[in-house]
Image (spheres, grey):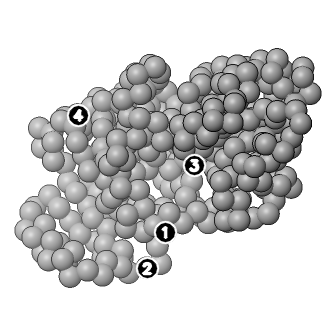
Amino acid sequence: MLHVYRNFEIIIINNNSMEEETYLFFDELQKMDNIHIIDLPIEFNYSKLNNIAAKKSKGDYLLFLNNDTEVITNNWIEELVSYAQQAHIGAVGAKLIYPNNTIQHAGVVIGKGAAWHAFYGYPSNFPSNEMLYVTRNCSAVTGACLMVSRKIFEEVDGFDEELDVVYNDVDLCLKIWEKGYYNVWNPNVLLYHYEGATRGKAHPKNNTDYFCKKWYKLLEKGDPFDTAERMKRERLRHSLQNNARKNQRDIYIWGAGSSGYRMYSTINEIEFAIKGFIDSDPAKWDKFLFDLPIFSPTILQSKALKPYVIIASMYSDEIKSELVKMGYEQQKDFWVDHSDF
């Protein structure tokens, strides 16, 4: 591990591991005094497993760390502790990137539609947004690498075990914030995240429904820390007013995935309406999304009046190139969510 901090213990929860190499590795680890392995052959429940681990631990600070992460910065524990030990600070998170050096996590944004990772899919060294380089408050941080003091963790009763797969980390952070503490994202702590490498990317609907019902009032208000999101909405409102509504052009969202969902909510909030979604392969989705149809890109060439397109996809560069080939001009004819956030 890349740190000089030595006063720590490691607790590994073995939840139905199957590979022989894993158990051989455990045999080696158990020779060390500060490493403890707990076998819990129960159905996977992230919250329950981590609550049990927390109770078994002895430290004043708890660091929850996924087994699909890899630390790549020095003094990472010192960086996390330096914030977690401050009396007004709750959870402290890290900057997580994919092996292709794009961002997986740079803080969590909440709002209508639940919660999502800020700057997801952006280049990790994206030069034009200072928010990627400053330590800042945010509504939540991912549990893939999250430090919090034991005192605060116990004060909020730990993870909610109703959230067995997703949103348990966001829920924890919102409980912490509700108690008057601030959650912090620290870009000086950098890890690779091989997200879903060990358990896949399950996203149970019952978790989403439970989380949204529990935090409905807060989600409706929007994220209290995300000034960049509010600024983006104002710029988008201005662009749609001048380039779409004024000329009575239809509006489409190119992107039927999670980014498209969020953009649809944003457009509703600023009181515009869209005609539908666009995807290069609409057959892979349900026929309708939010009761709106999903079209192939050919819909754009079938209209007498050129529609206005909002790109909300991690493949924004490719989509932008395709639109330019169709004779579209950025801002005048389309908005790229990736570059304007």
Residue 171 is labelled as 3
Q: In this view, does 210 lie to the left or right of 134?
A: right
- From mark 4 to mark 3, how far is it between C-alphas? 25 Å
Residue holding disc 2: 42
Task: Estimate the spatial distance between the alpha carbons at disc 4 and disc 1, rounded to whole Å.
Answer: 29 Å
* Location of residue 197 in the rendering, given as x and y in whole percent from the top left corner: 37, 64
Kind of residue indicated by mark 1: Asn
Q: Label 1 near label 2: C-beta < 8 Å?
A: yes
Mark 4 residue type: Glu
Nearest the camera: 288 or 266? 288
Instruction: Indicate left or right for 298 with 194 as reference.
Output: right
Q: Which residue is nearer to you in this view: 202 or 208?
A: 202
Crowdedness near tag 3: few (<14), some (14–19) or many (≥20) residues, C-alpha within 10 Å: many
- Amino acid type, label 2: Ile
Residue at 44 percent of width and 44 percent of height: 104
Q: If you read the primary sequence from the N terminus, does the residue marked by circle 4 or circle 2 appear first? A: 2
Residue 141 visible (yes or no): no
Query: Along the polypeptide, which appears first: circle 4 or circle 1?
Result: 1
Secondary structure of the residue carrying tag 1 is loop
Residue drawn at (21%, 65%) of the image? 36
Residue at which label 1 appears: 45
Badge 1: residue crowd in 10 Å (few <14, some 14–19, many ≥20) = some
| Residue 296, percent from left and from top | 73, 53
Kind of residue at disc 3:
Asp
Q: Nearer the viewer, residue 265 or 221?
A: 265
